[in-house]
Amino acid sequence: MAEFQQPLRCCNVTAVAYGFTALGYPTSVDDVFYVTRLPIATVLDDGMTLAETYDTCVKYIETAGLPLFAKVEHFDKSTMTFDAFVKEIESAVMNENDIHILNFNTKIAHGNQHLEGGHFSLLADYDSTTEELTVADTNPKRYTRFWKCNAKLMYDACVDKDSSSDRSRGMIIIKKLEI
């Protein structure tokens, strides 16, 4: 995976650019802002929700004409159980044609009450024997480039409600289209 370092408070847009790049479509954070005409204040002032980040992702795909498909999974859906999450991430790490962007609460995922709250990063790997997933972080200077997290802890961190939307966090899945 390529190295990405998010600009201040841009983990959402950085994760989208990182995801496109990992799928073979080199994209910078500036590209996402330029192509989608995303107002910088939207990101910097109060951040973006999972739904807003998904909308930006879809707009970039459509405007740039990329052969990709994106879907969003909010973890307040009754079908997104812990078992469904594990099944999804097990499948994801076996498929090089998709990327999963996780939106989670850092306090829960890192078990550290001194951290700020919501964050976006990519799923890099999952080990079913240890039930640990590896996260490719958008802010490696703060959290390290790759770090591990127990799957149940990450699930709980994604179920956490985003105070801006009053919905659970979750994930964005970006897949290459079969051409």
Image (cartoon, rainbow, N blue to C red):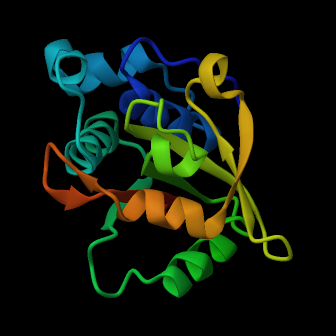
Q: Estimate the x, y position of residue 12 in percent, counting from the top left.
A: 38, 34
Q: Position of residue 125 (x, y in %)?
A: 74, 57
Quadrant placement of the N terminus: top right
Does the image show residue 179? Answer: no
Left or right: 156 as drawn, with respect to 9: right
| Image coords of residue 129 (percent x, y) | 86, 76
Q: Residue at x 48, y 30 (%)?
A: 114
| Res. 10 image quadrant | top left
Q: Is 77 or 88 nearer to us in this picture? A: 77
Residue 177 x %, y %: 48, 62
Residue under the image location 45 percent in, 57 percent down: 157
Q: At x 50% / y 25%, what residue is drawn?
A: 27
The picture quadrant where one finds residue 130 is: bottom right
Asked whether, in this view, residue 42 is left or right of residue 78, the answer is: left
Left or right: 117 as drawn, with respect to 109: left
Q: Nearer the viewer, residue 135 or 172?
A: 135
Looking at the picture, does residue 50 appear above or below residue 75?
above
Instruction: Give the farthest residue toward the right.
Output: 129
Residue 109 seen in this snapshot: yes
